[in-house]
Amino acid sequence: MTYTKKCRKSGNKYSVEARAVGRQVQLQVYATRIVLRQDGEIVGEHERCFGRGKTIFNPWHYVPVLKRKPGALRNGAPFRDWDLPPAMTQIWTHLRGTSDGDRQLADILFAAYQHDIDVVEAACEEALKSGLRKADAILNIVSRRTNPPPPKAIEPPAHLQLKMAPIADCARYDRLGGSHATA
């Protein structure tokens, strides 16, 4: 699973976002960085590597693929030595030992990809303080932090307020069904 584009001059490979795979990109080489564009949009940006024959990964380029292939977290080159924030690393360490840990971690990483890594890191910290280490709990916290609260109830204007509360008359309903019940 490598989504890289090769720089012909140095022989180095640089990763691009998963959506750019299989299509041509424009490579812009600067003194200190490499920018890869597709249809004018940046699909990869890396610090320039002056060695030869190296592969430079940005693990975030591969996160959307993890939704389909969560097992890549265990053996995928982009994820080796990935430096995640402390609470996320602690969750990752715990989930590695569970049967569906790869899938759960992929869900957490995808939330960080969609929202913001700081929001997910804070959610992981909150979950750890509560003794929770499952993706569902962390994603619930993320959802609460990213979704706006429900709107406050408004009071109707005085001219729209009820003057007499409706009275429930269940006997009326009984009379409707009474003729069919005896037949």
Image (cartoon, rainbow, N blue to C red):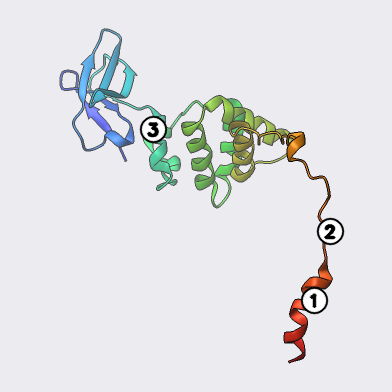
The disc, 2 or 3, on the residue closer to the chain's N-terminal end is 3
What residue is drawn where x is 73% and y is 33%?
Answer: 129
**Residue tagged 1:** 174
Other-residue count near label 3 (Cα within 10 Å), few / some / many at <14 / 14–19 / ≥20: many
The disc, 2 or 1, on the residue closer to the chain's N-terminal end is 2
Q: In which quarter of the image is residue 142?
A: top right
Q: Residue furthest bottom?
A: 183
Q: Is residue 173 above or below residue 63?
A: below
The disc, 1 or 3, on the residue closer to the chain's N-terminal end is 3
Other-residue count near label 2 (Cα within 10 Å), few / some / many at <14 / 14–19 / ≥20: few
Q: Distance between the residues labelled 1 and 3?
A: 70 Å
Q: Would residue 26 be found to the left or right of residue 113 on screen?
A: left
- Front: mark 2 or 3: 2
x, y (%) of residue 115? 51, 30
What residue is drawn where x is 32% and y is 41%?
Answer: 1
Looking at the rendered structure, the kind of residue marked 1 is Asp
Q: Is residue 52 above or below residue 100?
A: above
Disc 2 secondary structure class: loop
Marks 1 & 3, CB-CB < 8 Å contact: no
Residue 78 marker: 3
Q: In which quarter of the image is residue 13?
A: top left
x, y (%) of residue 172? 80, 71
x, y (%) of residue 167? 84, 58
- What is the tally of numbered marks visible in this picture? 3
Disc 1 secondary structure class: helix
- Front: mark 1 or 3: 1
Q: Which residue lies furthest to the left in this view?
A: 8
Q: Distance between the residues labelled 2 and 3?
A: 67 Å
What residue is drawn where x is 38% and y is 35%?
Answer: 62
**Residue tagged 2:** 167
